């Protein structure tokens, strides 16, 4: 049964006079109500694993802006955590994973049942779906195997993946074995999110950019094809959105994958190119530079208008080209939503 939701109808190929809107990182530190709940929870991880509070922060941006979709409050690094890798978030430094993964660790990972260890996340999904209005969609998500692997292999965010590329050339077998395990665990995790009430799922491949062609194919495109295909086969009604950040013209290869119902474009991609080369294959989502929303005003509106005009005659989901940053003024977000919906 399809929910009467503008977001899901768009993913199903319907063109809307006003596109559905949601934002990557719509729940987060830029919202004072988030910071309040976050302080109450203690740490970021405690917040992720507390269904009552995680459901609350998932719903906050919907209440504030009446967005068309909520995204589950969790993190892509909960999978490595569930696989047994120690995870912490240092204030102002981002995530730390210890110890860094080695070939000998794989057998242990393979044995872990991530759905067992992430039960509280599915409880959050059930709570949110129970509270969310029928015409709003709930998006579940996971990190793409390559992006998650970069954190597992480096123990932190890697701005320059040179060392990981080199590692790949030195020991392709190990890297692909890790990617393969993550692919399987991610399928289990996403299907369990859908069974708990997620209406659609998104895969974040934040660190796909800058990989040479055969490597990108092996570590990102093929695993995402496998995940999207498996999720679609197991749960026909739940669309899959891919967000491979920074892949440029290779976005076409993702858009053409069977099982890719929507494709998130990043702020570096020419939206005219995306309209010409991607919209014939899939539903395009996003693109607006999150920093335009930090600045706000005329520049933000003009930029939003570019996307609205280019995609007015095809199914399109309004979103950013990456997540909101903590310095985003919440009133700029309200002005943006009003501009997209009312033209002012
Ligand atoms: O609103 C939403 O988008 C839902 C929740 C969500 C979070 N992280 C919450 C979060 C989602 C979808 C993510 C995805 C995620 N997490 C990605 C892929 C998307 C992207 O932004 O590129 C990545 C790479 C991560 C890993 C991660 N989590 C990093 C690098 C950091 C630290 C940097 C930062 O922005 O703080 C996090 C922490 C994190 N995840 C926060 C939030 C709200 C901030 C934690 C806090 O409150 O202190």
Image: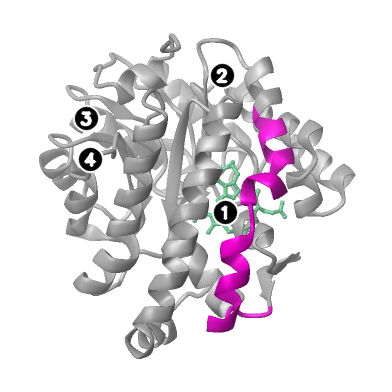
Q: Quadrant of residue 132?
A: top right
Residue occupied by mark 4: 258
Q: Quadrant of residue 215?
A: bottom left
Task: Compare residues 166 and 118 and report the one nearer the observer.
Answer: 118
Q: Is mark 4 within 8 Å of ligand 1?
A: no
Q: For residue 76, which numbered disc appears in the image?
A: 1
Using the numbered discs, state the Cα–Cα distance from disc 4 to disc 1 in whole angstroms: 23 Å
Give the residue drawn at x 57%, y 54%. Answer: 76
Q: Is mark 1 within 8 Å of ligand 1?
A: yes
Label 2: element kind? loop
Position of 256 with respect to 146 (left or right) is: left
- Here the colouring is one colour
Residue 24 magenta: no
Residue occupied by mark 2: 66
Residue occupied by mark 3: 311
Using the numbered discs, state the Cα–Cα distance from disc 2 to disc 3 in whole angstroms: 22 Å
Whole-percent x and y of residue 48? 73, 46
Specify the segment rendered in magenta.
99-125
């Amino acid at each position: 049964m399809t929910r009467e939701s503008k977001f899901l109808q768009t993913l199903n190929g319907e063109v809307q006079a006003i596109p559905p809107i949601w934002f990557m990182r719509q729940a987060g530190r830029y919202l004072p109500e988030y910071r309040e709940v976050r302080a109450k929870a203690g740490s970021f991880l405690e917040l992720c694993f507390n269904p009552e509070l995680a459901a609350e922060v998932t719903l906050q941006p919907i209440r504030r802006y009446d967005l068309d979709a909520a995204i589950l409050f969790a993190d892509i690094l909960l999978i490595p955590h569930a696989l047994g890798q120690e995870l912490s978030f240092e204030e102002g430094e981002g995530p730390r994973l210890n110890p860094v993964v080695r070939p000998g660790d794989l057998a242990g990972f393979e044995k872990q049942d991530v759905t067992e260890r992430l039960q509280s996340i599915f409880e959050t999904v059930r709570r949110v779906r129970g509270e969310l209005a029928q015409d709003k969609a709930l998006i579940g998500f996971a990190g793409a195997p390559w992006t998650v692997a970069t954190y597992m292999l480096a123990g932190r965010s890697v701005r320059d993946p040179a060392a990981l590329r080199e590692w790949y050339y030195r020991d392709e077998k190990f890297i692909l074995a890790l990617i393969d395990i993550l692919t399987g665990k991610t399928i289990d995790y996403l299907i369990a999110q859908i069974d708990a009430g997620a209406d659609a799922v998104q895969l974040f491949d934040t660190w796909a950019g800058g990989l040479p062609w055969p490597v990108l194919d092996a570590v990102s495109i093929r695993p995402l094809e496998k995940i999207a295909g498996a999720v679609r086969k197991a749960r026909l009604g739940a669309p899959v959105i891919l967000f491979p950040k920074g892949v440029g013209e290779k976005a076409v290869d993702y858009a053409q994958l069977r099982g890719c119902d929507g494709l998130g474009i990043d702020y570096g991609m020419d939206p005219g190119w995306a309209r010409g080369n991607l919209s014939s294959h899939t539903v395009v989502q996003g693109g607006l530079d999150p920093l335009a929303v930090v600045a706000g005003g005329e520049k933000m509106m003009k930029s939003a208008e570019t996307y609205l005009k280019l995609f007015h005659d095809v199914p399109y989901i309004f979103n950013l080209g990456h997540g909101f940053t903590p310095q985003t003024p919440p009133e700029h977000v309200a002005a943006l939503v009003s501009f997209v919906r009312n033209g002012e």
